[in-house]
């Protein structure tokens, strides 16, 4: 597939052009090629590529360095692979999550030649798949110095408000034991699938915490997301597996969050049952004490919200870099067939970030 240069001057048109570049996870080469070719024309930036990840930086010797990051991949299309513009609204895959944010970053990278702070722009791959495949990890392993910064902002869709930090997430596989028997003599066995009922009752009646961290209210959650079991149509099953997803606030470490879930299940599990942590991504504290983030909040004029999902703000927070989320698009539309972004959101997010980069606070 061959495409011309990316448009300049109109944020909605640029976003539409990016939407028209297919970039499902693990297929980001083309969009990275286009962004790289574009930014190679900007002499005030040092541009380096690591795999399908691109890092562009100013080197002005400023006292602070701000990092703006956005993922270039999307989930699979849902009848919305091509951009459609109706007035000031752009519909299409990734319009909100997060090619609108990429368009804002690209426009800033082109035009803000002499910011008051040094700026790093990171366009990275594979955010929408397993955390272990995330492009930021690839960059960190190959060139960790490229990701050094004093504060980071992720261009995730937030409808133009600052969504601080993020929740952590983990998945746990709960395996319940039983004993096989012929279903004609079921009393001779123990049905592991039937045992799921008590565990599911515990999960479904879970009362989620709503802790306030740095003035932001987070809402935790515990959900059953997968179930499996069964041997044959005439056999009492001796094993059943339930997968749980726990979202936890940044006032808990991953170890504390895991122990919390295990303690909830303790009363409904036997010694022969197992609970295995299969995936975990830590939470990120809001970090609103950083002057750059505080300045951004003032510029938006909108109340700060807690980020209830997980984002790569946690990647940076784990490395001691305060991080939050700020981008165009309604996060509730991400991954839906009706994904879209409005011109006003693109313009307002760009204006806030441009002013902040130029003034420094």
Image (cartoon, grey):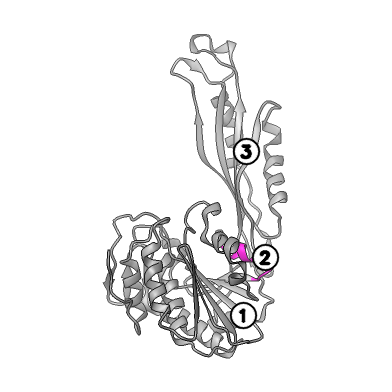
Q: Quick one: label 3, few (<14), some, or many (20+) residues within 10 Å? A: some
Is residue 56 something that shows in the picture? yes
The residue where tag 1 is placed is 65
Q: Name the residue under label 2.
A: 319
Q: What stretch is highlighted in magenta?
A: 312-322
**Residue at mark 3:** 202
Residue 318 lies in the magenta stretch: yes
Residue 30 within the magenta-colored segment of the rendering: no
Q: Which of marks 1 and 2 is nearer the N terminus?
A: 1
**Res 345 seen here:** no
- Depth check: give the residue in front, 99 or 32: 32
Residue 37 figure quarter:
bottom left
**Residue 104 to residue 249: above or below:** below
Q: In terms of secondary structure, where does tag 3 sit?
A: helix
288 to the left or right of 24:
right
Picture residue at 43% right of the left edge, 65% below the top = 72
Of 113 and 345, nearer the camera is 113
- Quarter of the picture holding the C terminus: bottom right
- Whether residue 115 is situated above or below residue 177 in the rendered picture: below
Q: How far apart are marks 1 and 2 (CA)?
A: 15 Å
Disc sitting over residue 80 in the figure: none
In this picture, residue 71 sits left or right of residue 290 = left
| Quadrant of residue 244 within the rendered picture | top right
């Amino acid at each position: 597939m061959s495409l011309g240069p990316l448009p300049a001057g109109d944020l909605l048109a640029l976003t539409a052009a990016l939407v028209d570049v297919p970039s499902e996870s693990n297929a980001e080469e083309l969009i990275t090629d286009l962004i790289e070719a574009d930014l190679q024309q900007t002499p005030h930036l040092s541009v380096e590529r690591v795999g399908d990840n691109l890092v562009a930086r100013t080197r002005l010797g400023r006292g602070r360095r701000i990092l703006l990051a956005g993922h270039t991949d999307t989930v699979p299309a849902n009848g919305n692979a091509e951009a459609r513009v109706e007035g000031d609204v752009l519909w299409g895959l990734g319009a909100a999550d997060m090619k609108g944010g990429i368009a804002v970053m690209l426009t800033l990278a082109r035009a803000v030649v002499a910011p008051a702070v040094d700026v790093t722009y990171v366009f990275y791959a594979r955010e929408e798949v397993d955390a272990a495949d995330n492009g930021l990890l690839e960059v960190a392993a190959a060139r960790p110095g490229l990701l050094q910064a004093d504060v980071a902002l992720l261009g995730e869709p937030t409808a133009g408000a600052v969504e601080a930090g993020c929740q952590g997430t983990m998945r746990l596989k709960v395996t319940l034991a039983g004993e096989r028997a012929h279903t004609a003599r079921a009393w001779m066995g123990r049905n592991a699938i039937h045992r799921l009922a008590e565990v599911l009752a515990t999960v479904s009646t879970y009362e989620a915490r709503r802790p306030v961290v740095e003035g932001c209210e987070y809402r935790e959650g515990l959900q059953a997301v997968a179930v499996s079991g069964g041997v044959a149509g005439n056999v009492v099953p001796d094993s059943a597996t339930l997968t749980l997803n726990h979202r936890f606030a940044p006032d808990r470490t991953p170890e504390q969050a895991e122990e919390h879930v295990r303690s909830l299940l303790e009363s409904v599990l036997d010694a022969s049952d197992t609970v295995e942590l299969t995936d975990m991504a830590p939470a990120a504290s809001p970090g609103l004490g950083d002057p750059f983030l505080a300045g951004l909040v003032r510029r938006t004029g909108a109340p700060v919200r807690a980020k209830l999902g997980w984002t790569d703000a946690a990647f940076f927070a784990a490395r001691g870099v305060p991080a939050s989320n700020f981008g165009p698009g309604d996060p509730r539309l991400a991954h839906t067939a009706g994904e879209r972004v409005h011109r006003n959101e693109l313009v307002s997010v760009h204006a806030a970030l441009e002013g902040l980069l130029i003034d420094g606070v």
